[in-house]
Image (spheres, rainbow, N blue to C red):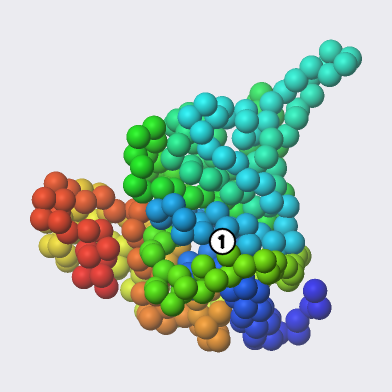
């Protein structure tokens, strides 16, 4: 990667690189432009992403395709009810000389696809917590750092609930975005059927490597942001908390509101959204553009909201 003379030059390069990534990914992924934008944003924000959608919406394929464009070490973990923490983290075993040797698990990669993450018990789910927050794992009292960049991109099926375990709030909060994938439009589905039922094979070319991603992550952190934008993000998050005199909507319909990590994520994601949109500093519109996937999994409705059929998305949109 050629070092840039100025941060403005680097920001222009990130914007151009995002467009190249988008073009390459669109060779395979059709009709999920918003999901692609947010997953790439999560990567540049050094965050993790949860994709929720019914089967057949290309959640796993989307993550696989993005991993191919990034030239990173990629591992897929299929979460099942019998999966143990050692199956993810690794374990200590005895070698031929009867000495303990640590065998690394699949968590030691740059991109982790946690497929159907809600199918494994809480004990195994919690094995990801330290990795997602501290970028390290602890085995037998020994701390093993994970290689950077490190991302957990998880999928979840919202329909089939038998044999599933809800993710704890502490783990949900570790995901910068909760993306809900919807059905494709008619024309998009026609294009999907045509491309997947033919004999044409699409080769995805790697575009970004480790050094470039780490440099762009640092660039996003350096993006300046005005005080009024930060204050707007904090006010938005505080308006989700019940018993907030400034917002009766939360008191009426919410059991729990978002914490300070939501405010942090709103600002960092708004910075990234501004850069990939060709701007050098975020405004309030950038905060609003990322608010729904950031707040969706951080607020909990009360019984009154459920009884009246008011969704979390409805409440967030009214607060915006």
Q: Residue at x 80, y 74 (%)?
A: 1
Question: How many numbered circles does the render carry?
Answer: 1
Q: Secondary structure at mark 1?
A: helix
Above or below residue 160? Residue 196 is below
Q: Is residue 45 visible?
A: no
- Residue nearer the viewer, 195 or 17: 195
On the rendered structure, is 84 left or right of 71? left
Furthest residue toward top: 98
Q: Is residue 151 visible?
A: yes
Residue 157 image point, x, y percent: 41, 48
Above or below residue 86? Residue 199 is below
Which quarter of the rendered picture does the C terminus lie within? Answer: bottom left
Residue 164 image point, x, y percent: 39, 36
Q: Residue at x 84, y 19 (%)?
A: 95
Quadrant position of residue 220: bottom right
Residue 17 image point, x, y percent: 66, 78
Quadrant position of residue 96: top right
Mark 1 = which residue?
62
Q: Residue at x 79, y 17 (%)?
A: 94
């Amino acid at each position: 990667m050629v070092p840039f003379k100025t941060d403005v030059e680097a920001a222009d390069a990130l914007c151009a690189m995002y467009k190249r990534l988008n073009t390459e990914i669109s060779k395979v992924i059709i009709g999920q432009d918003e999901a692609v934008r947010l997953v790439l944003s999560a990567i540049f924000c050094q965050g993790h992403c949860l994709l929720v959608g019914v089967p057949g919406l290309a959640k796993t394929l989307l993550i696989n395709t993005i991993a191919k464009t990034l030239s990173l070490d990629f591992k897929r973990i299929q979460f099942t009810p019998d999966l143990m923490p050692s199956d993810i983290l690794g374990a200590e075993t005895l070698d031929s000389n009867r000495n303990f040797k640590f065998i690394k698990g699949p968590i030691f990669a740059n991109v982790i696809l946690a497929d159907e993450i809600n199918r494994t018990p809480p004990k195994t789910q919690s094995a990801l917590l330290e990795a997602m927050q501290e970028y390290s794992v602890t085995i037998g009292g020994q701390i093993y750092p994970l290689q950077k960049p490190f991302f957990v991109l998880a999928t979840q099926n919202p329909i089939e609930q038998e044999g599933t375990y809800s993710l704890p709030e502490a783990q949900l909060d570790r995901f910068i975005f909760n993306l809900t994938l919807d059905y494709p439009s008619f024309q998009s589905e026609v294009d999907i059927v045509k491309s997947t039922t033919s004999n044409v094979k699409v080769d995805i070319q790697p575009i970004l490597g480790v050094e470039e991603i780490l440099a762009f992550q640092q660039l996003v952190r350096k993006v300046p942001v005005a005080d009024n934008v930060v204050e707007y993000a904090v006010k938005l998050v505080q308006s989700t908390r019940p018993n907030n005199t400034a917002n009766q909507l939360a008191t009426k319909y919410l059991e729990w509101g978002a914490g300070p990590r939501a405010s942090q994520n709103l600002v960092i994601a708004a910075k990234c959204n501004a850069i990939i949109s060709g701007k050098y500093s975020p405004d309030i519109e950038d905060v609003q553009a990322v608010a729904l996937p950031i707040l969706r999994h951080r607020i909990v409705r009360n019984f009154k909201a459920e009884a009246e059929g008011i969704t979390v998305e409805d409440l967030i949109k009214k607060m915006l």
